[in-house]
Amino acid sequence: MNIHEYQAKQLLKEYGAPVSDGRAVYRAEEAKSQASELDGPLWVVKAQIHAGGRGKGHFKEAEAGEKGGVRLTKSVEEAAEEAQKMLGRTLVTHQTGPAGKQVNRIYIEDGSGIETELYLALLVDRVTSRVSFVCSTEGGMDIEEVAANTPEKILSFSVDPASGISGFHGRRVAFALGLKGAQVKQCVKLINTLYKMFIERDMEMLEINPLIVTDKGDLKCLDAKMGFDSNALYRQPAILALRDETEEDPKELAASKFDLNYIALDGEIGCMVNGAGLAMATMDIIKLYGAEPANFLDVGGGATTEKVTEAFKIITSDPQVKGILVNIFGGIMRCDVIAEGVVTAVKQVGLKVPLVVRLEGTNVEKGKEILNNSDVDVIAADDLADAAAKIVKAVKG
Ligand code: GDP
Ligand code: MN
């Protein structure tokens, strides 16, 4: 789960990391009073969406020469005006995709004078199974670009959990970033703090881009992106409270409420499968037969008819879905439960696209019988290849 920049900065502040003073704005009429609580002489107006690259992004239906999602202004009035212009519109960045994201919240910040922009991130490194730091002197840029063009400008190292974080790590970062004097001490403190919050709050990713040296020579976190381990949210109620459901795919959100493992994808074949391995294999074989999966969906072992019904509804609610492939190997999951779920869902929401069903395993005969005795227009399949061939043919002709 991700959170907004202004929420991440609030968290940074609670842990004692240096951030600017700022105010979140939800409604246009609040903009001026919120901005007037900040000192100036520079007010930075920042669109809050769960995507980076806002500064270089653009709004849909932008006026000629209109700035992106990060705007520097010189008065409270100007700040309020820019905030009002951005609210409710759609911001497109290289991370949002062409559809962009609607801006429902604005963060107005006390602007900083910048000496240098640096890059700092913490992430979970799957190779070493440790928390890794990544830092670079090339802040404010896409780190992927820096990694591709000038990899020598990136330092990364992981922290041994047995010995934990120490001043050594902070000094290593400070040296790599070319920090001097008091900045080194600030950096050591910051590295300690970030590592501590990363562990305590079950983060997956924490990116400060840019980390800046201000014109007064101090370190400050000017941007912040945080991602949290969804599997740990049960023990992070304060983080869970920061969830912004409008930022999430509505289909994925619905699926999470029913405890379904669902990921929306771009293709045309909706998949309902049990077991992550079989779901992956199903996606692969759809591709092999020349089509693209519209989703990953694992209904799990203990799914009920109700859960299967919801899963089916989520799949059919996607306008991109031109055909559905149900592929079940009944082990713990019983084929008759799946069949009943499919029939119930079709009764409730109808079926406008071809449906191929491949059932195998526990109660398979009962499952087939339920489907055969229903009015649902099912194309039966015998195995994975047969199922994939049939659904691709039904969709593509
Ligand atoms: P992003 O484009 O989504 O990554 O948003 P950032 O928060 O990183 O802002 C983009 C850029 O705007 C930064 O790299 C800075 O160059 C600039 N910027 C942001 N805040 C300030 C500020 O307080 N003062 C100044 N001078 N520039 C800022
Ligand atoms: Mn940034």
Image (cartoon, rainbow, N blue to C red):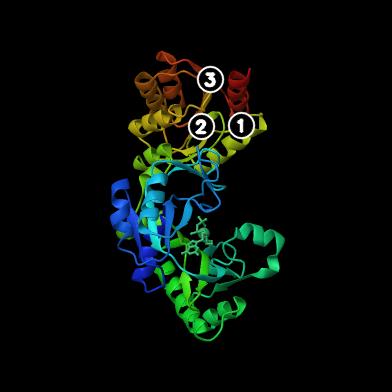
Label 3 sits on residue:
380
Label 2 sits on residue:
271
Asked if residue 107 is positioned above or below residue 85 in the image, the reply reads: below
Give the amino acid at mark 3.
Ala
Point out the frontmost of discs 3 and 1: 1
Which residue is drawn at the image coordinates 53% and 45% (left, top)? 58
Q: Is residue 381 left or right of residue 310?
A: right
Label 1 sits on residue:
286
Q: Nearer the viewer, residue 10 or 314?
A: 10
Task: First in sequence, mark 2 or 1: give its number.
Answer: 2
Residue 392: assigned label: none
Which residue is drawn at the image coordinates 37% and 29% (left, top)? 309
* On-image quarter of the C terminus: top right
Residue 346, quarter of picture: top left
Asked if labels 1 and 3 touch by Cβ distance under 8 angstroms, the answer is: no
> Where's residue 108, x and y in %?
38, 58
